[in-house]
Amino acid sequence: MSQIRTPEDRLNSSVEIGTLCAFYGGMLTPRQLQALELHYMEDLSLGEIAQQLGVSRQNVHELITRSAEKLRGYEAAIGAAGRMKRILRELSQVSRVLEDSKSAPDGKALVAKAQEMIQQIITQEEDAHGI
């Protein structure tokens, strides 16, 4: 039985696979990467992709499924995309603290807080990589 996917589900899948392709796409074969890009980025149907690649819809479905699982496996093992997401979130918080320091009566304390936050990010990354 086919699962009905909402537009939000499709968008989330496209963002997830797009992000994973950006990090790990070079570890896929050109055909795997092409199938994922056609399906997730260009939003082509399995039939349209099958016609372009000259294979069956079932073959395309299996290729896309295996390739997406492979990307998720790389992320589970390496975690680069998750780390980048966390770092960007933390840097966004640092940016807000620095922005607040512009109008704060004691901006120096907020700048010191931002510097401490940056040092925590650096330390986390150094510890994660054994540096």
Image (cartoon, helix red, strand yellow):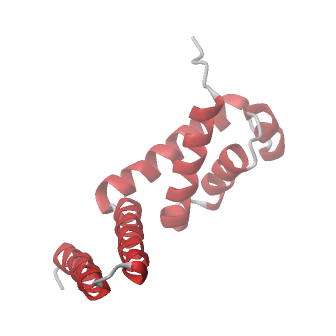
The vertical placement of 97 against 23, above or below, is below
Q: Quadrant of residue 18?
A: bottom right
Judged from this view, the residue extending furthest toward the bottom is 108
Q: Residue at x 50, y 57 (%)?
A: 20
Residue 56: image x %, image y %? 73, 32
The residue drawn where x is 54% and y is 38% is: 65
Query: Which residue is nearer to you in this view: 125 or 45?
Result: 125
Closest to the observer, 92 or 37: 92
Instruction: Quarter of the image for the N terminus: give it.
Output: top right
Placement of the C terminus among the 4 image quadrants: bottom left
In this rendering, the count of numbered labels is 0
In which quarter of the view is residue 52 placed?
Answer: top right
State the image coordinates of residue 112 (x, y, percent, origin top left).
Answer: 24, 86
The image position of residue 41, as x and y in percent, is 69, 50
Specify whether 71 is left or right of 40: left
Q: Is residue 2 above or below residue 43?
A: above
Q: Position of residue 129 (x, y in %)?
A: 22, 77
* Left or right, 68 with reference to 126: right
Whether residue 27 is visible here, answered yes or no, is no
**Residue appearing at x 37%, y 65% in the figure:** 80
Q: Quick one: which residue is furthest to the front in this view?
A: 105
Position above or below: 75 against 96: above
Quarter of the view holding residue 26: bottom right
Please say if 12 is above or below 79: above
For the question of whether residue 73 can be seen, the reply is: yes
Look at 60% across and 16% down and name the residue there: 2
Of residues 115 and 42, the one nearer the viewer is: 115
